[in-house]
């Protein structure tokens, strides 16, 4: 049973691969927010041996689930309401990513027109391959 003590309303990110919580903390931009966040490292897990957990107080809309799904879609997102788990969300690789990964093709329009957003579309879900919207440059996650 996941320990959510102290959290009345918020989000608990569970089953984070041990050691990855700080990386996720920064990638989600949690360092720039002023909501209360707790990071638990190396929590014991029956399923994973060790895992990390992030608890975010009151932050129902602060977490970009697309970004999180891209980083690691095996993370479980628990929505906490009235000190109880109200909902569990599982994540998927997002169909579209904006300014999360960047096109490295020097001939791509995004390297010429720097104000353009870097947009990638999911091309192969199984192989986790994304392609640049403008030049189709491949981006493999693995
Ligand atoms: Zn491109």
Image (cartoon, helix red, strand yellow):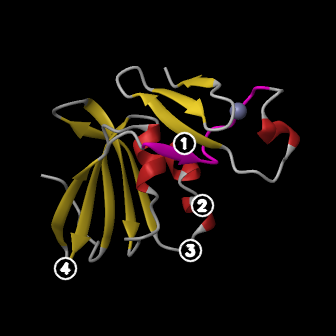
Q: Which mark is residue 34?
A: 3
Alpha-carbon span between mark 1 and mark 4: 29 Å
Q: Residue furthest right?
A: 112
Element marked by disc 2 = helix
For image coordinates 57% across by 69% down, the residue present is 33
Element marked by disc 1 = helix
- The magenta span reads 95-105
Q: Is mark 1 within 8 Å of ligand 1?
A: no
Q: Quadrant of residue 41?
A: top left
10 Å neighbourhood of mark 4: few (<14), some, or many (≥20)?
few
Q: Is residue 45 left or right of residue 1?
A: right
Q: Is residue 18 left or right of residue 80?
A: right
Q: Which residue is under mark 2?
A: 31
Q: Quadrant of ligand 1?
A: top right
Alpha-carbon span between mark 3 and mark 2: 8 Å
Q: Which residue is under mark 4?
A: 82
């Amino acid at each position: 049973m996941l320990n959510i003590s102290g959290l009345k309303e918020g989000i608990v990110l569970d089953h984070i691969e041990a050691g990855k919580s700080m990386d996720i903390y920064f990638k989600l931009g949690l360092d720039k927010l002023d909501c209360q966040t707790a990071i638990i490292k190396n929590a014991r897990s029956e399923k994973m041996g060790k895992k990390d957990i992030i608890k975010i107080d009151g932050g129902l809309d602060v977490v970009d689930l697309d970004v999180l799904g891209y980083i690691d879609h095996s993370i479980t997102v628990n929505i906490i309401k009235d000190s109880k788990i109200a909902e569990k969300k599982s994540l998927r690789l997002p169909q579209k990513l904006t300014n999360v990964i960047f096109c490295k093709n020097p001939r791509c329009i995004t390297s010429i027109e720097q104000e353009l957003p870097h947009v990638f579309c999911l091309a192969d879900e199984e192989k986790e391959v994304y392609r640049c919207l403008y030049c189709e440059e491949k981006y493999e996650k693995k």
